[in-house]
Image (tube, grey):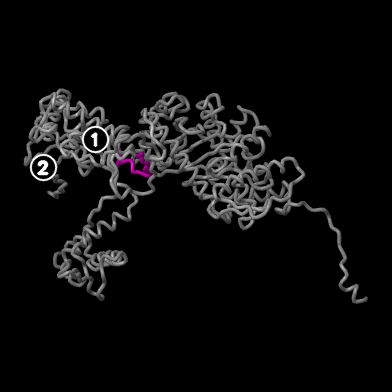
Amino acid sequence: MSADDEFRFRPKPGRIRADTPKLGKAESFLTQAKKVARQQSNSPSRSSASSPSRSRSSSPAKGGKASRTSTPGLKRGRGAAFVRARNLSGGWKHSSPGQRRVVVKTRYVQGAGKNGKSAAHIRYIQRDGTSRDGERGQLYSATDDRADGAAFVERGTDDRHQFRFIVSPEDGADLSDFTAYTRDLMSQVETDLGTRLDWVAVNHHNTGHPHVHVIVRGVDELGQNLVINGDYLANGIRERASDLARLELGPVTEIEHSRKLSADIGQNRFTRIDRAIAGEAEDRFLDLRHEPADHRRRFDRTLRLRRLERLEKMGLATEHASGVWELSERMESALHELGERGDIIRNMHKALKADGLERDPMTFQIHDAAPEVPITGRVVDKYLTDELGENLTVVVDGVDGRTHHFAGIDPARVEDARIGSVVEIGPAEPASRPSDRTIADIAEGGAYRPSRHLEQARFEGRVPGGDYEGYVDAHVRRLEALRRAGIAERIDADRWRIPEDFESRAAAHDASRKRQANIRILSAARLEQQIGADGATWLDRRLVTPDASDLASTGFGQQVRDAIDRRRQHHIDHGDAAPGPNGGTLYRRNLLATLSAREIERIGGELAASKNLPFRSVADGERISGKFTGTVQLSSGKFAVVEKSHEFTLVPWRPVIDHQLGREVTGLVQGGSVSWEFGRQRRLGI
């Protein structure tokens, strides 16, 4: 053989292959059946099932088959038979061509009936403005159009867990009867799970896509714990919801599908086109230079090019050559953020409009954390931040002329705040820790010694369990954390340098780390109700401290200015004030205390008639005792009702007393507050 023959190229033709990469060898039906049978055997699965305690999303496996990750955990939980049938028949079909798209979000909540979460969640999903006509949402069940939420909560008090679903059909606005659709869906779910379910639901029409909230008790019809297969939660409910939408509206036509995709081109959010673009890009580069021959693929290419042009204007994509695009690293996160911001602004507009208000969007301020400076305003909206959870979002029309948005608020902080209530939202309150106070007390000459602290702890003998070394070590660990913050300084193994303002700096450090805003309810009554009230209102406190520098000349700030003028005239008309020199006003001595006492006497008399007990007011410095039986909300603030066998009284309320409801309490009235004594004479000054 010659040297030329050695390097001569000899092609070896083979069978024609597809342009797309090969996904794997096709499996026969028998092979698939054997694989599923092995997975249902008693042998442990190679991978664990997804936890049902988080929200789920799913997509069909490539090539129309169930992927390997779609079958783990099929042998456990109700609905497993439905999942097995789907895997044997070729996998999930809810995202196949022609199917109606439905988004299903799922959450698993433990002990919801014991900690009040269930009642709070039901209360907030029925909030005002969620129905089709803008009225309060109506709770319904499988048989009742007006379900009793309190009875549902009571039935589930001892349930180990609770399931929450949000079902949002893409074409929900076209469904003729959303309630009937939900009942059909839950009936199908009951069939798949093989048990009757105890559930309630509320339809929401307050967003662009109508959706339904469904709450399911965590027990089956026999009262046993309800365990639902993880893959059924992730895909089965979505499959059934998609089938029902397709049954009523028919399959999605090619024209309808194209119209929906075309509408996504100009959206300021992460769309299906963006997801496809991100999936096709290699190292963030996408090559669209070659125009395919197939009509459908040409249309998809056109959609991508038009969307990329839109992303380029947003600074999220760059065209390096004709048809060659580079995607920004922050494309997905930025689009998700824009979508969330757009939803927030729409919600703020809707809340203001419902109150008959118009505000410039340029004055909208969205807070990611607690504000550094307290913000005062009225509540114009209060709704669930995560519609599957409990935390709230509060929208406040501020006296500074801005409209503020605060998310992730603990419901307990705004329980008494209603739409129209005046609140103050500020940074987290600095509170001194007991360990910080102990360190400051032990320190001598600006130095803290752990050895001396240990000697004193042993001498006093007050450490529970007698673990004196662990007790002192906990204080040293606290100092180590404050050392990293630059507040304390370690001199040697047994000496720490403590500054004079150690407690206040440590408390401020803790407050700066808290993102949760501190909320104080200044008045539960609306501004209009305060003008003619007989109690000491928030407007009165503004009157006696006439600094109006924080009140803007527009928006709610101007409304407060007008309300203060009307409140001043109200006091003049009722003899509690008189015109003064130079256009000023002279108010009655101790105006706030007088107004508060006047309102307490009136409300006390009204309560006395219903309780068949005489009312007695208390004086400053007086000791009170009795059973704490409840609270009343007055213009002057919130008051606790303390009853004896022969009389009752009203005293200023503080959060610390809530845990004593129905118990005997003792306290000392001092300066408009109360020092309570609980248990073995432990006094809590508040």
Along the viewing direction, whichever of 111 and 179 lies nearer the viewer: 179
Task: Name the secondary structure under disc 1.
Answer: strand
Where's residue 300, x and y in %? 68, 43
Q: Is residue 462 above or below residue 522?
A: below
Highlighted magenta segment, given as a residue range:
402-414
Task: Let me know if residue 609 appears in the view.
Answer: yes
**The furthest residue to the right:** 1
Tell me if 288 is positioned left or right of 425 in this view. right
Along the viewing direction, whichever of 5 and 457 lies nearer the viewer: 5
Along the viewing direction, whichever of 455 and 324 lies nearer the viewer: 324
Task: Name the secondary structure under disc 2.
Answer: loop
- How many angstroms separate mark 2 from mark 1 (CA)? 20 Å
- The residue depicted at 58 percent of the width and 56 percent of the height is 46
Tell me if 101 is positioned left or right of 217 in this view. right
Task: Let me know if residue 111 appears in the view.
Answer: no
Identified by mark 1, the residue type is Ser
The disc placed on residue 540 is none
Q: Examine the structure image and report whether residue 300 is included in the region drawn in magenta.
A: no
Where's residue 610, x and y in %? 17, 24
Along the viewing direction, whichever of 416 and 259 lies nearer the viewer: 259
Tell me which numbered mark, 2 or 1, is placed earlier along the sequence: 1
Q: Is residue 34 above or below residue 574?
A: below
The disc placed on residue 671 is 2
Identified by mark 2, the residue type is Gly
Tell me if 90 is positioned left or right of 158 in this view. right
Q: Mark 1 points at which residue?
A: 523
Where's residue 349, x and y in %? 42, 34
- The residue depicted at 14 percent of the width and 34 percent of the height is 650
Q: In which quarter of the image is residue 657?
A: top left
Q: In which quarter of the image is the N terminus?
A: bottom right
